[in-house]
Image: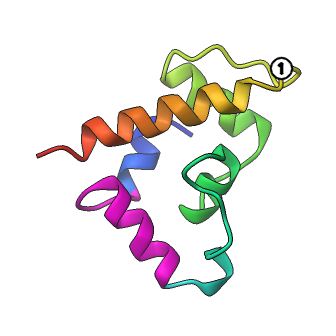
């Protein structure tokens, strides 16, 4: 999965698009997508596997080692930062 895969799932501003997806699926209401990369990927119906996250991290030039507890936080920060830039008019 690449960052482009993420973007293909979004329309309008990133946050609005994610909120629309959550509103349409009650099972996703409790997910912490703003702070958790796995939850964000679940909201977008994307692969949450280590391999998918490793590929996404490589695409965003983020150091990702699944043995490192901070790896998912770094990836989440990078994705949200990129989405924010993408969603700007």
- Closest to the observer, 22 or 2: 22
Majority secondary structure of magenta residues: helix
Q: Position of residue 4 (x, y in %)?
A: 39, 40
Q: How is the image coloured?
A: rainbow
Q: Position of residue 42 (x, y in %)?
A: 65, 61
Q: Quadrant of the N terminus?
A: top right
Image position of 83 with respect to 43: above or below: above
Point 58% across, 64% down: residue: 43
Residue designated by label 1: 68
Q: Is residue 25 left or right of residue 47?
A: left
Asked if residue 18 is among those painted magenta in the image, a careful observer would answer yes
Residue that lies at the very extreme toward the right in this rendered image: 67
- Closest to the observer, 63 or 46: 63
Q: Quadrant of residue 32?
A: bottom right
Q: Dot 1: few (<14), some (14–19), or many (≥20) neighbours within 10 Å?
A: few
Q: Position of residue 45 (x, y in %)?
A: 59, 64
Secondary element at tag 1 = loop
> In the image, which residues are magenta?
9-23
């Amino acid at each position: 999965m690449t960052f482009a895969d993420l973007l293909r799932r979004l329309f309008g501003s990133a946050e609005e698009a994610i909120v629309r997806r959550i509103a349409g699926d009650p099972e996703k209401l409790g997910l912490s997508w703003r702070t958790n990369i796995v939850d964000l990927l679940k909201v977008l119906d994307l692969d949450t596997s280590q391999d998918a996250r490793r590929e996404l991290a490589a695409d965003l030039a983020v150091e990702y080692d699944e043995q490192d507890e901070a790896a998912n936080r770094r990836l989440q920060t990078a994705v949200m930062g990129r989405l924010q830039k993408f969603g700007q008019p």
